[in-house]
């Protein structure tokens, strides 16, 4: 029985992760943590999940989270995730990270800790998006740069980072297929007289509005034809399912930085 802990258990995604963990065979919900002062602290995790009480209450000390769990799932905030990975290293525990928007310092913290403990880090835990990443990379490898690549993403009005982590991951997949560095060919915004589109550019467009869970489209456009891949998530449950699946897969793995492609055996 794999013991799972949930960081940020009082948020929308955290509560979904609680429910998915409780509904999954072969795992046990060991702990949940929130920041000090959050209304979830002290509440029963089962009740936070919208289910009956399970006898485990949310705590405000992340050290207790790592002490109780074999694997911690973290969909919190960049600064919190960077602090949590250091606790994972100290406790010798595995982590599944779905947090996006990490800066260079926070990213380096995750990469350094993954040398000591096993970490699955993915901008999107959806099985469908994981397959989409593989398809985009393969398509970019097969098509020459006369096919322009544009990536569109839309999320709810509360999302704070843009382009989304998933959009950037799709861009990196396309860049890998073309054997180039994304940072050397990306165009994140367009405004005013931008001139003709450079050959080989990978463009991004970000939309925000309503309660959109997540929509991503990758367009390969050439003279005479277009190829489009689209993934739309209608519920955060797909991310929770993928994260719990990753936690089950990660338990007992050696130290390293893994992706959802590793979890699905696509690497």
Image: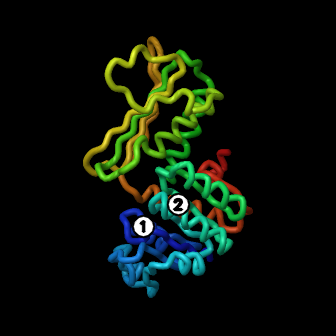
180 over 256 or under it: above or below: above
Does the image show residue 188?
yes
- Local packing at callout 1 (Cα closer than 10 Å; few below 14, some 14-19, many 20+) is many
Find numbered disc 1 in the image and state the secondary structure of the residue it sits on.
helix
How far apart, in angstroms, are the residues tagged by discs 2 and 1?
A: 11 Å
Q: In x, y percent, where is residue 42?
A: 39, 84
Name the residue beneath numbered marker 2.
Answer: 243
Does the image show residue 228?
no
Q: Quadrant of the C terminus?
A: top right
Q: Looking at this view, name the residue that lies furthest to the bottom.
A: 55
Find numbered disc 2 in the image and state the secondary structure of the residue it sits on.
helix
Q: In x, y percent, where is residue 199?
A: 52, 17
Q: In x, y percent, where is residue 101?
A: 47, 50
Q: Looking at this view, name the residue that lies furthest to the top.
A: 223
Name which residue lies at 40% across and 57% down. Answer: 236
- Local packing at callout 2 (Cα closer than 10 Å; few below 14, some 14-19, many 20+) is many
In the foreground, 38 or 173: 38
Q: Picture quarter containing residue 1? A: bottom right
Q: Tell me: 258 left or right of 186.
A: right
Q: Looking at this view, name the residue that lies furthest to the front.
A: 105
Name which residue lies at 52% across and 62% down. Answer: 81
Name the residue beneath numbered marker 1.
Answer: 14
- Whichever of callouts 2 and 1 sits on the residue coming sooner in the sequence is 1
In the foreground, 144 or 224: 144
47 over 104 or under it: above or below: below
8 over 182 or under it: above or below: below
Name which residue lies at 55% across and 52% down. Answer: 122
């Amino acid at each position: 029985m794999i013991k799972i802990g949930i960081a940020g258990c009082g948020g929308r995604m955290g509560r979904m992760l609680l429910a998915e963990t409780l509904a999954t065979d072969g795992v046990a919900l060991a702990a949940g943590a929130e920041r000090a002062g959050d209304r979830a602290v002290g509440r029963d995790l089962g009740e936070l999940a919208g289910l009956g009480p399970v006898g485990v209450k949310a705590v405000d000390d992340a050290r207790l989270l790592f002490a109780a769990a074999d694997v911690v799932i973290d969909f919190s905030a960049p600064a919190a995730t960077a602090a949590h990975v250091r606790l994972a290293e100290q406790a010798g525990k595995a982590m599944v990270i779905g947090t996006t928007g990490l800066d260079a310092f926070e990213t380096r913290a995750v990469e350094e800790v993954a040398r000591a403990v096993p970490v699955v880090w993915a901008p999107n835990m959806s099985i469908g998006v994981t397959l989409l990443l593989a398809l985009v990379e393969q398509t970019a490898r097969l098509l020459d740069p006369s096919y322009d690549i544009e990536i569109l993403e839309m999320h709810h009005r509360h999302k704070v980072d843009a382009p989304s982590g998933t959009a950037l991951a799709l861009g990196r997949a396309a860049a890998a297929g073309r054997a180039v560095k994304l940072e050397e060919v990306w165009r994140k915004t367009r405004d005013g007289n931008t001139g003709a589109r450079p050959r080989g550019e990978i463009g991004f467009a970000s939309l925000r509005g309503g309660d959109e869970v997540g929509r991503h489209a990758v367009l390969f456009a050439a003279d005479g034809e277009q190829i489009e891949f689209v993934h739309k998530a209608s519920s955060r449950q797909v991310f929770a399912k993928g994260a719990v699946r990753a936690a089950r897969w990660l338990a007992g793995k050696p130290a390293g930085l893994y992706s959802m492609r590793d979890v699905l055996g696509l690497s």
